[in-house]
Amino acid sequence: MADPKTRKNYDNMTPEQRFSDILHDEIVSASKFLGAFNSRTTNREKCVLLIGNAQPRVGVVAEGKSIPTVDVDDLTPITVYPVKWAGMDILTNEVIADSDPSVMARNTAKLSGAVAKGFDDDFLNAPKPGAGKDQDQAPAGILTGLTASGEIAATGEKANLDAVHTAKAEIEDADGSASLFVVHPMDAAELKKIKVNLGNTKDTNQYLLDDSGSIAGLTVITHKAMPKGKALIADRGAVEVIVREGTEVKLLTERYADLDSTGVRTKFRATYKVTAPKKLRLLTVPTAKADEK
């Protein structure tokens, strides 16, 4: 949530303008993925991304020979359209009239959190658009099409971070740098209970996931939308997120007049595109035992 003390003066704004400004910042900060991956803000109805077909690299040039330029054909333009995630809540007229941004922020946290939750869930899991739907305007979740390529086991020799290190190496081989480890909160709790297998008989107090907030140098993000039993290892630059400037707000006063309240309907517009699929890796992780659920 943005610090109201650092925000501009809201006294001369309409209630809709104040809501739009504050809700936009709240939704962006409430999302666990809008700030974790590459993102940009635009006021346009659509945005063109350039996606590399082949990764250019530095080559050896003979003495006296000219240095070649990068071929623009290595980039493919992709048009994306920010689509909407909407939510609605009912607030008292006193809150609507209050120009103090901290008051509004406290009262809109539920609404902004619900919109951010919807975006985050779709960001990971949204299915591919069905027949007749515009492929560009209904992006599939970034997990769509990913299959697990490694395993972290609960017992035995695989109770180590070898699969994580392998995934990091594969991403580096694709000219990336792994930085994120996304996992379901319950699976994160399970990883914190499993001791690392050192391959010898000595006991160890090292767990697969410690309390430092990282695993094998990766920043851990826990989210309920992440499928249980899976973990995503990602380069922050593997996905581009496009956010439209401003959140659309409409106040509905007449419908709730008898309650001395106003309905707040909001539309947050964003989209995303996997631009480097080789910089994403999915692993299988231990889940809680059936008798512990």
Image (tube, rainbow, N blue to C red):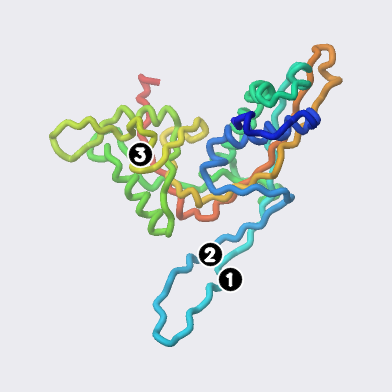
Q: Nearer the viewer, mark 3 or mark 1?
A: 3
Q: Amino acid at mark 1?
A: Asp
Distance Cα–Cα, label 2 vs label 3:
31 Å
Which residue, given by chain and number where applicable, does mark 2 sit on?
Answer: 53
Q: Earlier in the sequence, mark 3 or mark 1?
A: 1
Q: Earlier in the sequence, mark 2 or mark 3?
A: 2
Expressed as whole percent of the image width and height from the top left, the position of residue 247 reads 71, 37
Left or right: where 76 falls relative to 154: right
Indicate the secondary structure of the residue bearing disc 3: strand
Q: Amino acid at mark 2?
A: Asn
Expressed as whole percent of the image width and height from the top left, the position of residue 66 reads 48, 83
Q: Earlier in the sequence, mark 2 or mark 1?
A: 2
Quadrant for the N terminus in the image: top right
Whether residue 121 is visible, yes or no, is no
- Quarter of the image holding residue 14? top right
Which residue, given by chain and number where applicable, does mark 1 sit on?
Answer: 73
Residue at 54% from the left image edge and 40% from the top image edge: 33
* 167 vs 290: above or below: below
Residue at 27% from the left image edge and 37% from the top image edge: 159
Which residue, given by chain and number where applicable, does mark 3 sit on?
Answer: 215
Residues 214 and 63: in front is 63
Residue at 29% from the left image edge and 45% from the top image edge: 162
